[in-house]
Amino acid sequence: MQSKTLSRAFLLLLLKSSILFAAPSVSLSSAIKESITIGENDTLLVQEPISRWSKLRMKDGSVILLTGISSWNVEIDRAEIGIGCQIFGVGEPGENRTRALDGSQGPECGNGVPGHNGEHGGNGGDGVNIKMVLNIVQIGSLNIDVSGGDGGDGGDGGHGGPGGNADVSKNCRGGLGGEGGNGGNGGRGGKGGNVEIYYSAAGEGSNDPNFGDNGIKNSINIENKAGEIGIPGRAGAGGPGGKPARNKIGFAYISKGGGSGGSRGDTGMVPTSNIDGETKVIRVGDFDCLADQVGKSRAILIGNSTNDSTAKFREQIIELYNVLKSKNYQFSTIDTIFDISTNDFHRLVEDIQKEAETEDSYFIYITGHGYKSDDFVGIKSPIGKIYLDELYFIFNKLKVDKILLCLNVCHAGKIFDNPFLTSSTPQFSNAKQPIEVCNHRAYTVITSGYDDAMVPVKDFTDQFILNLRRMKEFTFTSEQLFSSMIRDWGNSDQYPMLGKNYDYSLGDFIFFKSSQ
């Protein structure tokens, strides 16, 4: 236990120091690194919130030190971890406070000056939140420490100053002693960091790690408790009362009493209970499935204006195309189609059925005008209409791995009246990760609303494009993209919806971006 405490103290000292210790260190200035090797007992400083490594090799006793970031998302295609390795992202401890100044003595017959109140202890820093996706090829022992920093101790209150002495000539008693200062509150311990690990084990003889184990082989231990609460400061003592006086005036002695002592201050308060970090560990399937799917997706972007005067839908499709290209989204082809007729749409689907292979994925985005009658709901086209029920069954026939169908049209959410589709609103914290869904077929549908006319506070396509621009992950699911969109959607008559085919509820569409 002692060596572990010394190790943490040393690493915290390193974080504050402007001079790194003698062992070679590497500072990451980029979020993208192809291959990383950390030598025996060496330290790697990570100062960026996102890392994507094709290979990480941590030799015995090596350390990854997270500094200057509140969260770290890392994807590791191959992880080889030695014995006694660490990932360290502990919050810094709060500052301890010293005793406050005492009050000074009051003037003759005056009250003493109260002692100063002690300062509150500094709050401990929060541990780094970690989200890790890794394929373990070799594992010795790894300790992940993202505990919250301990709160600082509150300062003791200063003592009250003595009261001024009595003065017969002024006919006054001694002054009251000054009140003692209040002790400062103890500092709050920092929150423990949340840790999410999605892992698979690969390579001959590789075994699943034992989590929560401090062993030297096949073990990953996670420490993410909240920091300790700082000790409250002690109350300052009240100052003594002023001394009495007795003077002889003529043949008589006249006395004046002393003052009473000042009251003691209050002890500092203990802060509210601290918050431990949450831990989520998920064993996923074949890690290589992500690599196998890169470059096998096709995007088809359709804008139907029904030949009216507005060019909005066309402009949005062009902007969506530009974002997919400029942000290096990995699609084998990206096709844009404008004002497609019903017959041409059916021919398009027939061509897809002929060309598609079982491992392919399709992202189909349709924006335009919708319509609703007593019998049907659908999408307007320059010639004819495309019914929503028909649309679902057309794409359901495709024998491909993954489909994402996005509809930005009036009444689009009526497609979820289909009994074969679920609907949900995943939050970002529980949205499925790519590694969780890559081994499962998917048919996901996202719509701009339910049975609403398309007059939203926020335009669905604009928000879709905005979130494609700002997604930092290199691989993410449509659930993650959707939940990112709705986090700041606000109040609106139109609220996006997400649903899946019942048979493929475990899967989801995966977006890929390259680093180039």
Image (spheres, grey):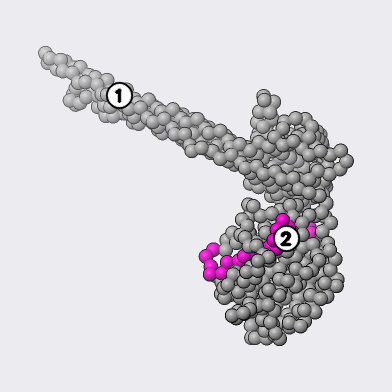
Residue drawn 40% across the image and 27% down it: 236
Above or below 76: residue 340: below
Amino acid type, label 2 = Asp
Task: Answer yes or no: is residue 469 visible.
Answer: no
Give the quarter of the figure containing the N terminus: top right
Helix, strand, or loop for circle 2?
helix
Q: Which mark is residue 328?
A: none
Residue annotated with mark 2: 503
Residue drawn 83% across the image and 51% down it: 288
Image position of 388 (left or right of 203)? left
Quadrant of the rendered image containing residue 138:
top right
Locate residue 315, reporting x and y percent: 68, 77
* Outermost residue toward the left in this view: 251
Callout 1: 10 Å neighbours few (<14), some, many (20+)?
A: many
Callout 2: 10 Å neighbours few (<14), some, many (20+)?
A: few
Locate residue 156, reporting x and y percent: 45, 29
Locate residue 382, reporting x and y percent: 70, 85
Amino acid type, label 1 = Gly
Task: Pick whichever, 374 or 341, lies toward us.
Answer: 374
Above or below 246: residue 121: below
Q: Which residues are magenta?
A: 490-516
Residue drawn 79% across the image and 68% down it: 398
Q: Main secondary structure of the magenta part?
A: loop
Helix, strand, or loop for circle 1?
loop
Give the quarter of the figure containing the C terminus: bottom right
Above or below 317: residue 197: above
Membership of 508 in magenta stretch: yes
Q: Which mark is residue 261?
A: 1
